[in-house]
Image (cartoon, rainbow, N blue to C red):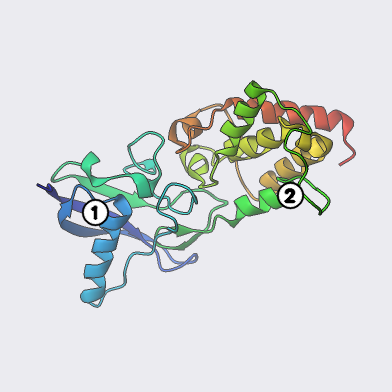
Amino acid sequence: MTKTINLTLKVWRQKGPEDKGHFETYHADNISTDMSFLEMLDVINEQLTLDGKEPIAFDHDCREGICGMCGSVVNGRPHGPEKETTLCQLHMRHFQDGDIIAIEPWRARAFKVIKDLVVDRSPLDKVIQAGGYISVNAGSAPDANTIPVGAETAELAMDAAQCIGCGACVAACPNASAMLFVGAKVSHLALLPQGRPEAARRAIKMVRVMDQLGFGNCTNETECEAECPKGISITNIARLNREFFKASFFSNE
């Protein structure tokens, strides 16, 4: 038999970037514990629409923990209380009947609030555009075994490549730093031979753009690792620092 719970939601409402936001209280009654957090918001929005009120704006796309689009701060924690879980994968069974849940957007200078829980995360895209790629000539795909890569190195690269760019690390950091995100993107390519030719330029350009966009500095608080839905390790920040320092000595960028 499906269990239902009754909740009180305190949701951040903000009409636009220049408006002053505030919390509004909603009652979520008879919520199935089998629902995801986003499905619970869908139910609330359906009722708001029927009542002729403005629904709550929130980001989502795949709802499978892949795209990185969803994300809100739930009771002070990005993506909610469960470890290595995106907001769309968070189920209501992790809450108790009568709970009060505060829901607010990512809080960071670089992430401007567009509306309600939706923030502009395009600064992360701009960091990637600065160098988070490799330049290759068009043509047929090369043989997969042309450049051997050791198993341990491949695992480290794939661990870093799991980053979905949701921005939870920025929202969790007291400095609103994007170092875990940038560290993951730089590590992913720096560990592989295909990424080495542009390694110095990549590290300098991505860090430079990150600073220009208003992200804070890393002070090793480690909240980013604790709240990352993909469990990205802060060792990637250490690797980013090494890549940046090496590039500073040898690059003309």
Where 112 sits versus 84, above or below? Answer: below
Which residue type carries mark 2? Answer: Ala
Q: Is residue 159 left or right of residue 242?
A: left
Question: Mark number for residue 215?
Answer: none
Q: Residues within 10 Å of mark 1 (few under 14, many from 20)?
A: some
The structure residue drawn at horizontal position 43% and vertical position 59%, both measured from the top left corner, is 59
Where 57 sits versus 243, above or below? Answer: below
The structure residue drawn at horizontal position 50% and vertical position 37%, both measured from the top left corner, is 173
The structure residue drawn at horizontal position 24% and vertical position 46%, both measured from the top left corner, is 92
| 52 and 184: which is toward the camera | 184
Question: Mark number for residue 130?
Answer: 2
Asked which secondary structure carries label 2, the reply is loop
Per the image, the residue denoted by label 1 is 9
**Res 187 → quadrant:** top right
Residue 105 placement (x, y as % from top left): 42, 53
| 110 and 179: which is toward the camera | 179
Residue 47 placement (x, y as % from top left): 21, 69
Residue 134 placement (x, y as % from top left): 76, 45
Where 191 sits versus 41, above or below? Answer: above
The structure residue drawn at horizontal position 65% and vertical position 28%, both measured from the top left corner, is 154
Q: Is residue 16 left or right of residue 121?
A: left
Asked which secondary structure carries label 1, the reply is strand
Disc 1 versus disc 2: nearer the observer:
2
Circle 1/circle 2 CB separation < 8 Å: no
Q: Of callouts 1 and 2, which one flags the residue occurring earlier in the amino acid sequence?
A: 1
| 19 and 149: which is toward the camera | 149
Which residue type carries mark 1? Answer: Leu
| The C terminus, quarter of image | top right
